[in-house]
Image (tube, helix red, strand yellow):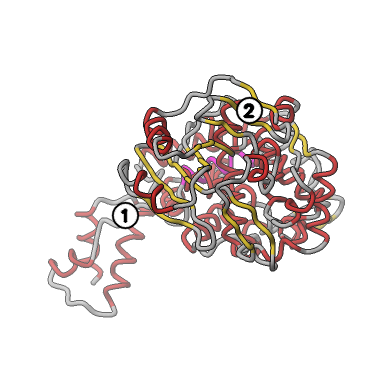
Amino acid sequence: MFTTTIKFNIPKILEDILKSLQEIGVRPILVGGCVRDHFLNIPVKDYDVEIFGIDCFDTIKKILQKYGSVKLVGKSFGVLTLRVDEYDFDFALPRIEKKVGNTHQDFEVITNANLSFKEAAIRRDFTINAIGYDFSKKEFLDPFNGLSDLKNKIIKHIDDNTFMEDSLRVYRAVGFASRFDFQIEKKTKELCKKIVIEDELKYLPKERVYEEFKKLFLKSRKPSIAFELMKELGVLKYFPELNALINCIQDEVYHPEGDVWIHTMMTLDEMAKIINDNNIKDEYRILYLFYGILCHDFGKPFCTKEINGKITSHKHETLGIEPTISFLSKLTNEKKLIEIVCSLVKNHLAPFQLYLAESSLKAIKRLSLKVNIEDLCLVCLADCLGRDIKDKDKCPKATSWLLNSAKELNIQNKAIQPLVLGRDLIALGYKPSREFKEILEFAFDLQLDEHLQKEIIIKKIIEKY
């Protein structure tokens, strides 16, 4: 087995834990993403440790409990998780796995403390994820030449048979290629295609696919790489909403780059730049911004027409709602996320429409009731920049105008709030009734359209009612 003695810096708290485990005769080996990312100079917060030389899980658990709250995850095989400060640690016994059914739970798992590192690592997906760090000997273990593949920027599977047993590896392959700007090795790509052709992806639960999309969006500087690979591998047959974008024509004046698919890929990469430039760290926000731009033109295949030599996609923003819900429902059941993305899709043209029309403040106020204006501006900016037009300097003009106007009203991140509420009507002596709703709508319209203060609105309510 190839080994190397390059220095591997790990957190002090993890060193203390591993030393405690060594005292009971354990041989701890760090493995997986933490080792890979060390060589890629990527900051590490999650550490996976395989525990060799001991079969008693309870003994390991007692040691770990000295450092914090320990949780057991995985019914068929044990993984102990421990969170200390900003770090997440996973501890597991070495094991071999054998697929016995179609779902991700249908694996026969056999733990064996006496396995060699190479025997335990063969179940892993790619060579770059099968590099270990032997804490006891302070050396790296590289049984499948993962370091060479890291150097050459190659995503390569370890074993034909074990790779085919988990279809999620198709998504992982395209995700790593996108995150690290690596190439998928030819044979690995062929196996991925075979998994897709044999329809194995249909057995994956949506939660697992969603997690791979999540890692892709949160960690990739160029998400389009993953989606182009999904297209090449045939994965888009599971997402007809994305597949429909291919060869959907656009007006060359506004979209000289090509069809809707090409434009969408460009907007994804622009969104990655925008998120980085704005130093956005909120993971939930990053996800719905990416999904907003990914889905923003889903309506175009339903309405794109060529009339008198001109290509139009009238009302595509509204027609995009149904396919957006259909697409996102394949990935998640979270209604709030779907609602936010739909609001961005439905209103993604609004910033330019309002800007070009030199709209009044009342239009901006009403827009705040439909969508988060700051988020909308980011989606609109990515949409404008994600094309091959020459006058890209116009892109931030519209979004900056709208965002600055919203900031003046303090509604860039929230809907405008009504000044007159039900309790104000009760204070005036009105009794709750069906008329309440009408009066409150009247008051809100005055606030939005005529910019009146609360006192004047109340006077007008008294005059009318």
The part of the chain drawn in magenta is 373-385
**Residue at the extreme right of the image, as rendered:** 309
- Quarter of the rendering occupied by the N terminus: top right
Tell me the tag on residue 169. none
| Image position of 302 (left or right of 429) | right
Measure the alpha-carbon separation of dots 2 and 1: 34 Å
Can residue 384 be seen here? no
Overall secondary structure of the magenta section: helix
| Image position of 293 (left or right of 435) | right
Q: Nearer the viewer, residue 73 or 432?
A: 73
Crowding at dot 2, Cα within 10 Å, few <14 / some 14-19 / many 20+, comes out as few
Can residue 247 be seen here? yes
Q: Quadrant of residue 40?
A: top right
The x and y percentages for residue 308 are 86, 54
Crowding at dot 1, Cα within 10 Å, few <14 / some 14-19 / many 20+, comes out as some
User: Residue at horizontal 55%, vertical 44%?
Assistant: 351
- Quarter of the rendering occupied by the C terminus: bottom left
Query: Which of disc 1 and disc 2 is earlier in sequence?
Result: 2
User: Of the residues shown, which amino acid type is indicated by label 2?
Assistant: Asp
The x and y percentages for residue 412 are 41, 43
**Residue at the extreme bottom of the image, as rendered:** 434
User: Residue at horizontal 87%, vertical 50%?
Assistant: 309
What residue is shown with label 1? 417
Q: Residue 11 lies in magenta, yes or no? A: no
User: Of the residues shown, which amino acid type is indicated by label 1?
Assistant: Gln
Q: Is residue 204 above or below residue 402?
A: below
What residue is shown with label 2? 393
